[in-house]
Amino acid sequence: MAGTQVFRGAKLATMTGAETPYGLVRDGAIAVCGKTIEWAGPADALPEQFASAPAEDLGGRLVTPGLIDCHTHVVFGGDRAGEFEMRLNGAGYEAIAKAGGGINSTVRATREASVAQLIEGALPRVDAMIAEGLTTIEIKSGYGLQSETELAMLRAAREIARRRPVEVVTTYLGAHATPPEYKGRDDAFVDEVAIPVLRAAHAEGLVDAVDGFCEGIAFTPGQVARVFEAAKALDLPVKLHAEQLSNLGGAKLAASFGALSADHIEYLDEDGVRAMAGAGTVGVILPGAFYTLRETRKPPIGLLRKHGVAMALATDCNPGSSPLTSLLLTMNMACTLFAMTPEEALAGVTRHAARALGLSDRGTIAPGMRADLAVWDVAQPAELAYRIGFNPLHRRIFGGQS
Ligand code: DI6
Ligand code: FE
């Protein structure tokens, strides 16, 4: 077939959810036409129609779906190394936030940055992720908290997809924190800024989904529900930072809106897990924030498994609670800190991450899927989560292009 390309000599971790661990095909082949996988399976079963297509031997290397980071705040101004230092000298994350530091210090720096500066700041972080096989990234707003800067963050996020071979999914996170000019007037901020700016950003085509931060230091379930109602009216999917530092019933609220995901969820209880299972809401596990904040309460992995809630894994890359740009290290942390299995970790950055973004065209190696692939110099898939600080990526294929 014209324009078709075949990869042979590949050990495929198809991640299709089939019975075999990792959906592994030991001696596999993949036929790619344009941006799409036409066929994938055992090399000796490659259909006749692909026999004459140009073929490339991958030398027995492991091929996985391209990695997907489904929760990042990778666009922001400034950094918070000073705050990191303060925490290690005894100040708490919530105390720093209440004293005007934390998220609001990044808000100040982000408001001072131009779109060009936001892009320049984010690209090295995105490049570090791409170097580890990333092909799709979600990027949130939420450090502007005023019209102009929220729009600037989302424009910067869209521009990253034009500057780099990576797909970007944007999330509007206007209800992330209350900025200083609205201090003590959270409700007014939600109604006068978070919701109207969502409508403006949506009108500019900048929003793929809507998120909120439901927490004692952020917004109540009632305030989040108002933002979600506005999202629903625009036909936008929702997701939520829920149960990170306490249990306010955020995951249950998210599930009641049919949310794509509830994220962090360290304090999630079985009731919340049941609600997520019923709604098909993905649990996004963020070990980078748990690690950085030296939290001790772990997400209820056993309950999520028991109720069949899909678990995704993401970096939560942000300057405060998770200055992390490595999905491989995220996988390792999920295994070592939360006892997720290496297979769950890989599913968390492929199949389940795609689901957390509402994307049905990626995250597995199967016919009809985007030809986003990562080729690794490893003998077995468990090595991806096993190593610490080592990058075995051999090459990345993005939309069929090397
Ligand atoms: N939870 C997080 O982990 C990030 N945002 C949120 O709602 C942290 C944001 C920050 O500290 O800058
Ligand atoms: Fe986050």
Image (spheres, rainbow, N blue to C red):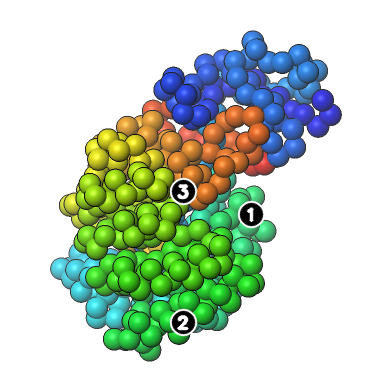
Q: Is residue 253 left or right of residue 159?
A: left
Distance between the alpha carbons at the discs numbered 3 and 2: 26 Å
Determine whether the residue tagged by mark 3 lies in a helix, strand or loop: helix
Most distant residue in the top direction? 44
Distance between the alpha carbons at the discs numbered 3 and 1: 22 Å
Most distant residue in the bottom direction? 181
Are circles 3 and 1 on residues that touch, CB within 8 Å? no
Of residues 131 and 66, the one drawn nearer to the viewer in this rendering: 66
Determine whether the residue tagged by mark 2 lies in a helix, strand or loop: helix
Q: Which mark sits nearer the N-terminus, 3 or 2?
A: 2
**Residue 327 x/y as whole percent:** 43, 45
Callout 3, which amino acid? Answer: Ala
Q: Which residue is mark 2?
A: 193
Residue 80 in sight in this render: no
Residue at x-position 45% and y-position 26%: 22
Q: Which residue is mark 1?
A: 164
Give the position of the C terminus as an image quadrant.
top right
Q: Which mark sits nearer the N-terminus, 3 or 1?
A: 1
Residue 220 in sight in this render: yes
Residue depth check, mark 3 versus mark 1: number of the one nearer the observer:
3
Are circles 2 and 1 on residues that touch, CB within 8 Å? no
Say if 391 sits above or below 79 in the image: above
Callout 1, which amino acid? Answer: Arg
Q: Which mark sits nearer the N-terminus, 2 or 1?
A: 1
Callout 2, which amino acid? Answer: Val
Determine whether the residue tagged by mark 1 lies in a helix, strand or loop: loop
**Residue 183 x/y as whole percent:** 32, 86
Say if 302 sits above or below 19 in the image: below
Of residues 332 and 284, the one drawn nearer to the viewer in this rendering: 284
